[in-house]
């Protein structure tokens, strides 16, 4: 997905409850895997896997700080999803003659 995420790809990435929880935590502040894994009912390696899925969907960035990888949300990460939803809304409006 590195060439650009699509709305459906983003929905797939956020379709898992653990990934949604991780995404929500990252919306508060950047964090490393150890901190993200606290209170999550999966192992640190599973959290790493979920972060990889979020990175592949272009929702999360990672920076290396010393020995740690710090994950943060991509500011523009949800834009493809918002655009896709807008397209569906426009198509629906056109199909219904502007009626909702």
Image (spheres, rainbow, N blue to C red):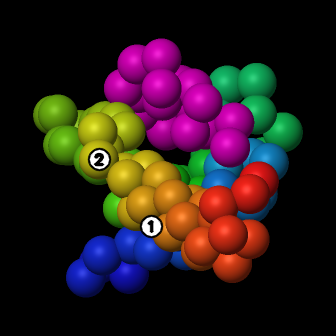
Residue, disc 1: 57
Q: Residue at x 18, y 43 (%)?
A: 64
Q: Main secondary structure of the magenta part?
A: helix
Residue 76's place in the image compared with 30, above or below, is: below
Residue density around tag 2, few if under 14, some if 14–19, many if 20 or more, within 10 Å: few
Residue, disc 2: 76
- Is residue 32 a member of the stretch shown in magenta? yes
Residue density around tag 1, few if under 14, some if 14–19, many if 20 or more, within 10 Å: many
Residue 31 vs residue 4, the one in the foreground: 4
Looking at the image, the residue that sits furthest to the top is 28
Tell me which corner region of the image, top left, top right, bottom left or bottom right, holds residue 56: bottom left
Q: Residue at x 55, y 65 (%)?
A: 90
Q: Which residues are magenta?
A: 20-36
User: Can residue 52 be seen by looking at this rendering?
Assistant: no
User: Can residue 26 be seen by looking at this rendering?
Assistant: yes
Residue 97 vs residue 60, the one in the foreground: 97
Asked if residue 85 lies left or right of residue 43, the reply is left
Residue 100 vs residue 2, the one in the foreground: 100
């Amino acid at each position: 997905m590195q060439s650009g995420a699509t709305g459906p790809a983003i929905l797939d990435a956020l379709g898992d409850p653990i990934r949604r929880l991780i995404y929500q935590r990252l919306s508060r502040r950047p964090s490393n895997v150890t901190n993200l894994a606290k209170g999550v009912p999966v192992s640190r390696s599973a959290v790493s896997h979920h972060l990889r899925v979020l990175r592949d969907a272009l929702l999360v960035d990672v920076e290396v700080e010393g020995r740690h990888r710090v994950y943060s949300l991509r500011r523009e990460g949800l834009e493809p999803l918002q655009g896709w939803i807008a397209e569906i809304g426009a198509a629906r409006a056109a199909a219904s003659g502007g009626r909702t």
